[in-house]
Image (cartoon, rainbow, N blue to C red):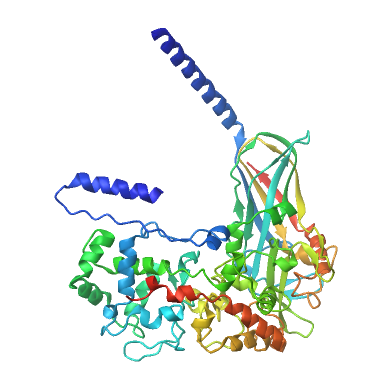
Amino acid sequence: MKNTILFLLILSSFTLITSCNENNEYESSQFNLTFNFSHSWDEKTVTNTDFNTIQFTNAHGESLSITKLRYLISRITFEKPNGETLTLDGYNLVDVTNNSNTSFTPIPKIPEGTYSKVSFIFGFNNEDNYDLNYPDLNSVSWNVPEMLGGGYHYMQLEGKFIDNSSTETSYAYHTIRAVNNRVTPQVFKDTFFEVDLGEVTILNDTTFHINMNISKWFDTPNIWNLNDLNNMLMPNFDAQIDMFENGQNVFSLKSIKP
Amino acid sequence: MKHWNLYVLLFLILSCSNDNQEIYVQTPQPLNIPILFEENILAPVIPINNPQTAEGIALGKKLFFDPILSGDESQACADCHAPEQAFTDVRRFSEGIDGTLGKRNSMPLFNLAWNYDEKFFWDGSSFSLEHQAFIPVSDPTEMKNTWTVVEQKLQNHKEYPTLFTQAFGSSKIDSIAVTKAIAQFERTLISSNSKFDQYLLNKIELTAQELNGFNIFMDEARGDCFHCHGSDKNPLWTDNIFHNNGLDETFIDLGLGNITGDPSDNGKFKTPSLRNLAFTAPFMHDGRFTTIEAVIDHYSEGLKNSETIDPLMKKVDSGGIGLTPQDKADLKAFLLTLTDFEFINNSAFHNQ
């Protein structure tokens, strides 16, 4: 009996030691990632202290201010050279107006190694947009009305501009999944998009610095005339497509630093 | 669950420390969170140093209805926050104990635990519900008292020392304990059983007019109310944020701007909830509109431009979006579906 107990003790201790070793080895190859989001108007850095003053000029020539900017990013994905992907749980509502969530550290760590592509989704893909209910996003009134298909906003960019009669006028540049409400059944077009940050090798805890050039929302390929398109853009199918196309150029990777 | 553990631990410690001393253990009474709140929005804000207890809530309720807090013992919180008016005042400006009028309309009180930023009052000048409850006692246009006097009166009262001991474990009464108790009671003021809530719970149907009104509310090209007042996914019907909704070209009252000192905040006031509009007239921070129709008319054709007007206010140059008479009637019909009769008749919220 004593021998049996001794054997079991030794066996369990060995198992424990082995487990610890495996855990340490596992832990040692996992790294924290942080995604910092900055914002600019071309070369000029933009923070919420630059809001509420007409000081920017878009490609069409309108002078404008920003009073609100918040947007959603999701599905940060690491793709290995063999095509295997690792998608991090969670999403982040970057709120520039309140200077909150401009830094996002996903909970799971990432194994060290070289990844052929790192990317995230601007907005939500359709699965994330429609299949789940998000109390945190509902609590900040981020929803899209059911009549427009439901789900969530991707971005809210608001401010004032000087219109062609020299009057200060409001704009609300809200991006959602495009929907044509004038036909039955409604026609949808995906307007979330992937932002490709390129190849990266993870050997330490790593910080990605991503910049949004806000001016690009009004530029390339569609020169945005705020006199024509300044409000009620959510139900405007064509405007949503144009925003989607312009959005392809707004994000850039500034740096990856350990 | 964690709170339960804490109470048990506290009980054990107190039990062990002195067997001869009378021990008061508060009875946890967590908020009864409505299903639509549970499913759709974040958990309520309950300060870690002021958990909801049966004794605390009962004490807070007694204090809320007791004129002892005011300078001449003539005015209670409930005088300007009447339960039958969804805890607001029918008067445009409430009168203080000496007849002085305030400069803003009394805010209704419900669902306050879900104000995540914890900025209270029309201008957000108070952080936390406890701090909010601290202000009216010494405001010369309201209760016009001093906390020293209040504390002394309560301390000398035949019932209160015992009630405070039961609620907080100490008979020493101060403003912190008073405001904690009032805040606990105020957090229980939950409004969640309107006709529209029942519709969302598939218990009843709405009329065609009410449904059309909801569509106008949610239509960015017509009402576009949802951007500030939430939607069927946010049972608060407010974003609890501050906006300039186009009431004035120039401001007599700077609102949030007076608190932050930032000119870009001038003329901004907190979005009120649209629940219980049937009881909460007059409307806006200064109570300028006496009817729901007048409020709808304002957003439809009465908007006034100013530097800080919210970009969500549309077609300001022509006064607004210009709803048709039918749209206006339908929108009002929908808004009235947010009326919660159970809330204003709830005996737990009345002085009994």
Q: Is B291 placed above or below A254 here? A: below
Q: Residue furthest bottom?
A: B99
Please state if B17 lies on the left or on the right of B289 as rendered: left
Please state if A38 lies on the left or on the right of B125 as rendered: right
Residue occupying the point 48% across, 61% down: B33
In the rendered image, which quarter contains the C terminus of chain B?
bottom left
Instruction: In this rendered view, identify the residue nearer to me: B84 or A38.
Output: B84
Query: How many callouts does the rendering have?
Result: 0
Residue occupying the point 65% across, 81% down: B331
Give how far across and how far down residue A97 sits, in percent. Answer: 61, 66
Q: Is A258 placed above or below B248 here? A: above
Give how far across and how far down residue B77 sits, in percent. Answer: 35, 78
Give how far across and how far down residue A172 sits, in percent. Answer: 71, 72
Give how far across and how far down residue B324 sits, in percent. Answer: 72, 87
Residue occupying the point 50% across, 62% down: B34
- Could one spot residue B64 in this view of the protein? yes
Instruction: In this rendered view, identify the residue nearer to me: A36 or A85.
Output: A85
Q: Residue furthest front?
A: B204
- Could one spot residue B309 in this view of the protein? no
Please state if A151 lies on the left or on the right of B277 as rendered: right
Please state if B161 lies on the left or on the right of A256 as rendered: left
Instruction: In this rendered view, identify the residue nearer to me: A115 or B238.
Output: B238
Residue occupying the point 43% across, 10% down: A4
